[in-house]
Image (cartoon, helix red, strand yellow):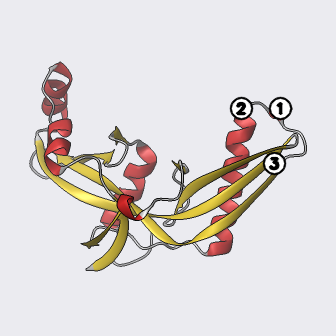
Amino acid sequence: MARIRSLRPNVSRDEAIDQFSSGGPVELLRQVAFGPVRSVAEFFIPFRLFQVEILNSGKRDQRVLGLDAVTGTLDLYHFEELPGPGEVVVVETRNCPLGLLDDARAMELVIAKVRRVLFTTGFFRMRNLEISAQPVAGEICIPYWVGFRGRGTQARFAVMDAVRRRIEGAKVRNLLQAWLTSISKPI
């Protein structure tokens, strides 16, 4: 088993089970369509952290952003500041894909993603835009809860960010599915 550094989760296993099998009409429809919740598992995605500096129209903005180190396809993870010792735990797990991105490619991706986000706020607001990113040493993993449901041989799953208490979308599900279905080969 690998030893990883992870953000401390804000959602316990029991809370995740409650979230994935919450009562009400929506859960009843999910059970009819996809089957009951069968299992809940912890899953971790490694992220590389960057100190990003944005210079736009003479204004300087600094951010701490995380880029998934597996494929670089997930949305950037925003941090108020670098995680301190009280926010990080060491975990032994098998449920963590390897970080495959090299440093140069990761830096290219984080700058491109920041530029894309800025341009969506208004292309004409950009004047003399400069974006620089400095990698922070080491990786930090983000914990997720995966809820598996189904009947017979059919299985479906949902993924919840265990820090932000938010159900994730297709990008995280696709990364997890690719990792689950790979046989000791990189994603």
The residue sitting at 30% across, 79% down in the picture is: 2
Classify residue 39 as left or right of residue 110.
left
Q: Nearer the viewer, residue 146 or 56?
A: 56
> Which amino acid lies under the numbered mark 1 shown in the image of this protein?
Arg
Give the left or right position of residue 111, taking residue 96 as reference.
right
Q: Position of residue 10 (x, y in %)?
A: 29, 47
* Callout 3 secondary element: strand
- Residue 120 at what x, y percent from top left? 70, 34
Q: Secondary structure at mark 1?
A: helix
Image coordinates of residue 61 in percent, x first then y, are 72, 46
Residue ID for mark 3: 55
**Label 3 is placed on what type of residue?**
Leu
Residue 80 percent location from the top left of the image:
53, 48
> Vertically, is 186 above or below 108?
below
The furthest residue to the right: 128
Residue 170 numbered mark, or none: none
At 89% from the left and 39% from the top, the residue drawn is: 127
For label 2, the residue is: 121
Residues under labels 2 and 3: Cα distance?
A: 15 Å
Q: Nearer the viewer, residue 79 or 38?
A: 79
Labels in figure, total: 3
> Is residue 176 at least partly visible in the picture?
yes
**134 or 182, nearer to the observer:** 134
Mark 3 neighbour density, 10 Å: few (under 14) some (14–19) many (20 or more) = some
- Identify the residue at image location x=46%, y=48%: 171
- Provide the secondary structure element on which disc 2 rests: loop
User: Which residue is disc 1 drawn over?
Assistant: 125
Say which quarter of the image contains residue 7: bottom left
Find out whether the residues at labels 2 and 1 contact each other: C-beta distance under 8 Å: yes
Q: Which quadrant is the C terminus positioned in?
A: bottom left
